[in-house]
Amino acid sequence: MSARYQFVGATAVAISASIESGIRTGGLPPGATLPPVRALAAELGVSPATVSRAYQELRQRGLLATAGRHGTRVRPRPPVAARRSALLPAPLPGARDLSRGEPDPRLLPALGPHLAALAAEAGPPVGYSDAGVLPELAAAARARLSADGVPAGELTLTGGALDGIERLLGAHLRPGDAVAVEDPGWANLLDLVAALGLRPIGVPLDDEGPLVPGVAAALAAGARALVVTSRAQNPTGAAVSAARAGELRSLLAGRRDLLLIEDDHAAELARVPLHPLAGATASWAFVRSVSKPFGPDLRLAVLAGDETTVARVAGRTRVGAGWVSSVLQRLVLALWADPAVAELVGRAAESYERRREGLLAALAEQGMTAHGSSGINVWLPVPDETSAVTALRDAGWSVAPGALYRIAAPPALRITVSSLALE
């Protein structure tokens, strides 16, 4: 598709605008390869330096990525709103879709009854001066975090886990700073790091979390922030073990030059104990979203941290979005307080565990070793992603290529178990 797109422009600004337009309209879809610098320069009648500056500007904004011998490509999720049709994947008639990374909608709590109850109990409208974190939600959040060993004296709310991470990175770092991220890791986070103009340093991991030598190497390379997924890591399902947490705490102890961010996005859906790193460094934050256990449309995450870090995030929110809707806060509080919802979330966690373990066992019977100690995803190493994805597609299965989640990690596939049926 990229070969048919007509690039235009006589300056770096005009060329970058032309490429951005192609991304926005779908002429240059995610993953599309751009022409080599010299080839595009010859086509447009400009110097290679002009095209190089255009590419560099778009890389710094997170729209493009350099893929080594594969050239320059459009990022999988470039930070520019595209036409809805350009966001849709290629249709797979009759295929089983195991690529989405989303919870099973049949295992999410129904919001209608709680919304109806809130409507019946609604008081006077909330004004600007009264908005903020509801005291009763803050108390409930502190109790839930404290039960898992997370110090929660200071906390605030954000519009989901990624929103919280973005605010944390924006409050502490500047474009060009290095961020240590898991490799393979959450594709949305990798795209966010690129969009913020930050430099990712990949940290390898195993089933017990980030490898200590990899974290040490990232710190030595100048990383100013470290993002760790506590459990149900996307895409590998890794969960930080007690032993690994102890080793990482020893490595990070007392560091005043590093922002430590923990992402516990799965929360109640992860049927493994939490071993937090919270407080290991002077600047830290622990982010827990409600989206996975209670529904992706509930854009709320609790963010606990040291006093300065929480104050920075809360202050930045105040001058921007302002606050997380008190209606949403009350809905989440109602879900937390409902024993039937807690029971449903428990059943969902058990169901995902059985699906995941069933898939791992089935793959093992075929001589394939996969990873997935928690969460809803399984990570399957393969010799070649393209041929594996194609073969599965031809067999009626849609999976996600590992390239979306990798920096330097070996090839693999991400398989989401949410839509698998239990036999």
Image (cartoon, helix red, strand yellow):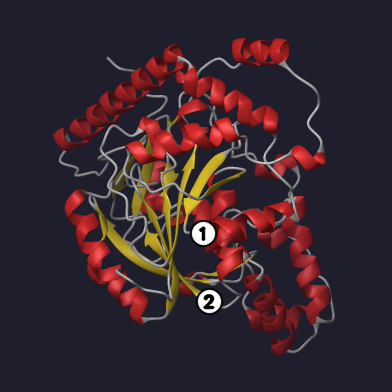
Location of residue 191 by image quarter: bottom right
Relative to 281, say whether 350 is above or below.
Answer: above
Q: Badges 1 and 2: C-beta atoms under 8 Å apart?
A: no
Instruction: Note whether 355 is above or below 233 in the view shown.
Output: above
Give the crowd class for mark 2: few <14, some 14-19, many >=20 residues within 10 Å. some
Query: Element type at marker 1?
Result: helix
State whether residue 64 is above or below residue 103. below
Mark nearer the N terminus (1 vs 2): 2
Q: How much space separates mark 1 and mark 2, taking CA atoms? A: 23 Å
Q: Residue at x 48, y 15 (%)?
A: 338
**Residue 90 rendering spot, x and y as whole percentages:** 59, 39
Amino acid under label 2? Asp
Q: Secondary structure at mark 2?
A: loop
Indicate the quadrant containing the N terminus: top left, top right, bottom left or bottom right. Answer: bottom right
Q: Residue at x 75, y 59 (%)?
A: 22
Residue position marked by numbered label 1 in the rendering: 307
Q: Quadrant of residue 415?
A: top left
Residue 118 appears in the picture as rendered: yes
For residue 312, side relative to residue 149 (left or right): right
At x 27% / y 47%, what residue is drawn? 275
Q: Is residue 208 left or right of residue 278?
A: left
Front position in the image: 170 or 45: 170
Q: Is residue 31 at least partly visible in the picture?
A: no
Residue type at mark 1 is Glu
Q: Considering depth in this image, is 328 or 5 the residue closer to the camera?
A: 328
Question: Where's residue 262, x and y in %?
Answer: 41, 53
Q: How far from the left and from the top, in percent, is residue 29? A: 65, 53
Q: Which mark is residue 177?
A: 2
Q: Which is nearer the eye, 409 or 321?
A: 321
Left or right: residue 417 versus residue 356 is right
User: Residue 286 location, x and y as percent?
Assistant: 44, 51
